[in-house]
Amino acid sequence: MKKILFVCTGNTCRSAMAEYIFNTKVFFKKLDNKYSAFSAGVAVYSSTPASDYSQAAMRNAGIDISGHKSSQINEEDIENAYLVLCMTGRHVDYLREHFFHYREKIFSIAEYLHINKNVIDPYGLGYEEYKKTARLLDALCEDIIKKLETE
């Protein structure tokens, strides 16, 4: 099974949503025996649930993330991942610097998909921004799965 690790800053918004969207998609595509996702953050101070707006945006999409707890990234996470997908280049830079032995598997989603679109943090913004982020992640996860299937 190939494990995909999604990474953002606090692991309460973007990477959490990406994890659940990805896992839902592979389940419905009957690919959950090949792929699974998990998530972590580069600046997690304590294990907390996904943000209220993240939970609401995901509920709106028919996905329950109420059981999510944020997790600080560590070397074991990266070692166990087939692929590490970050929301922005800044996350990539941080991980490649701190976990340089795993540089070859660390990418931003944009870099991996060869697009020019970081996933901007909706933290502190309104519910509509979280819904936009969820829709973007939905499309990106679809493209990630398609690419994984061709590798």
Image (cartoon, rainbow, N blue to C red):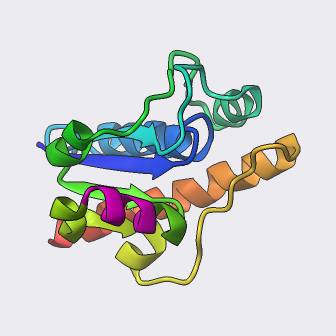
Q: What x and y, as percent, mark residue 86? A: 44, 59
Front in this rendered view, residue 130 or 41: 41
Identify which residue is drawn at 55% across, 21% down.
Answer: 46
In the rendered view, would you say 14 is above or below 74? Answer: below
Identify which residue is drawn at 55% across, 55% down.
Answer: 137
Front in this rendered view, residue 58 or 45: 45
Q: What x and y, as percent, mark residue 14? A: 58, 47
Identify which residue is drawn at 53% across, 67% down.
Answer: 90
15 left or right of 121 in image: left
Instruction: Judge whether residue 95 is colored magenta.
Output: yes
In the image, farthest residue toward the right: 126
Q: Is residue 136 visible?
A: yes
Q: Is residue 148 visible?
A: no
Q: Which quadrant holds residue 108?
A: bottom left
Q: How many numbered discs, if any?
A: 0
Give the residues in magenta: 92-99
In the image, farthest residue toward the top: 67
**Quadrant housing the N terminus:** top left
In the image, farthest residue toward the front: 98
**Quadrant housing the C terminus:** bottom left
Q: What x and y, as percent, mark residue 144? A: 36, 63
Instruction: Judge whether residue 118 is colored magenta.
Output: no
Q: Which quadrant holds residue 141?
A: bottom left
In the rendered view, would you say 146 is above or below 36? Answer: below
Judged by its main secondary structure, the magenta piece is helix
Q: What x and y, as percent, mark residue 64? A: 56, 23
